[in-house]
Image (cartoon, rainbow, N blue to C red):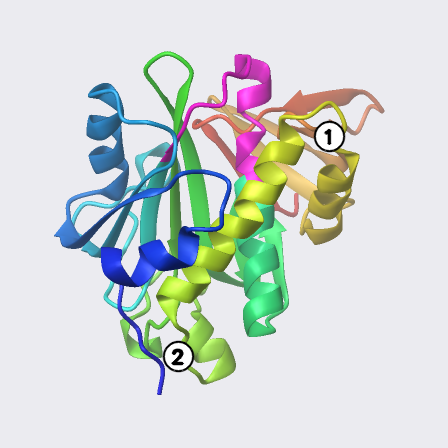
Amino acid sequence: MIRDTLTEDAILPLLRDLRIRWQVHAYGSVASTNDAVRRLAESGAPEGTLVVAETQTAGRGRRGSTWASPPGGLWLSFLLRPHLPPERASGISVVVAVAVARTVIEECGVSARIKWPNDVFVEGKKLGGAMVASVGEGGLVVGVGLNANVPEDQLPELSWYEATSLLRETGQRVDRAMLLARMLAAFETRYFSYRSPDHAELMNEWRELSLVIGESVTAVVGGETVRGTVFGLEDDGGIVLRLADGSHRKVLPTGDVTLSVGV
């Protein structure tokens, strides 16, 4: 029987061998794990500060959208202090997306893929996603939401996509503490790789898992609609579109950008 407990005592022993010194704050319910980490960051909390909650009452996704957080999911945020220039910091979204997708592939056997910039899909259904926001001087708050043990009848109704969960896809519950630990381990490996001069392997992994490379897409950038084919994925997290006139347009994963496949 799966022991599915998200407490500090359950999580911390699983993180002892990791490189980052993770400091875990586990709650039954919070308004937003992102907001909780942001408050801790503003009080001087170190990199590796992690907030996990069973539910969020006011979770938010990219562009301020509502992030439904029913019981059984994996809802968390953590603090990074990577000391990267802004144009490189945006690529952390790539690191997070790859780590989440790779973890559920290897641990749960599902065919996860990444819809740019950082949503995780399984067979056309949204399994989870991430968001990265700046805080303070060079700090980043990373939020991750994953429908882990969420029953089908409790999955959120999404406007554009059908939602799914690991429970729905596999028919089995997962140990969320262990899944979290494996996800953070996968993240660490790629995070330190991204901060090094040579991170070609990470970028190749992102391209391999991408749902949009080579696809015709419509991007809305600050109110402007741009249509083209995804020609490349850049190591700052951006995509390069080939437009109808043959020119190229780079789009960064900022909070005001949306992307849909198809034109």
In the image, the segment drawn in magenta is 79-95
* Vertical arrangement, residue 183 with respect to residue 245, above or below: below
Give yes or no for residue 50 being in the magenta stretch. no
Q: Which of the labelled discs sits on residue 241, or is there none? A: 1
* Vertical arrangement, residue 119 with respect to residue 192, above or below: below
Q: Residue at x 53, y 53 (%)?
A: 100
Q: Is residue 117 visible to us here?
A: no
Q: Quadrant of residue 11?
A: bottom left
Q: Residue at x 58, y 36 (%)?
A: 191
Q: Residues within 10 Å of mark 2 (few under 14, many from 20)?
A: many
Q: Going by the image, does 114 lie left or right of 241? A: left
User: Of residues 191 and 60, which is closer to you in this image?
Assistant: 191
x and y percentages locating residue 34 in the rendered image: 28, 37
Label 2's element? loop
* Vertical arrangement, residue 150 with respect to residue 241, above or below: below
Which residue is label 2 attached to? 173
User: Of residues 75 and 253, which is closer to you in this image?
Assistant: 75
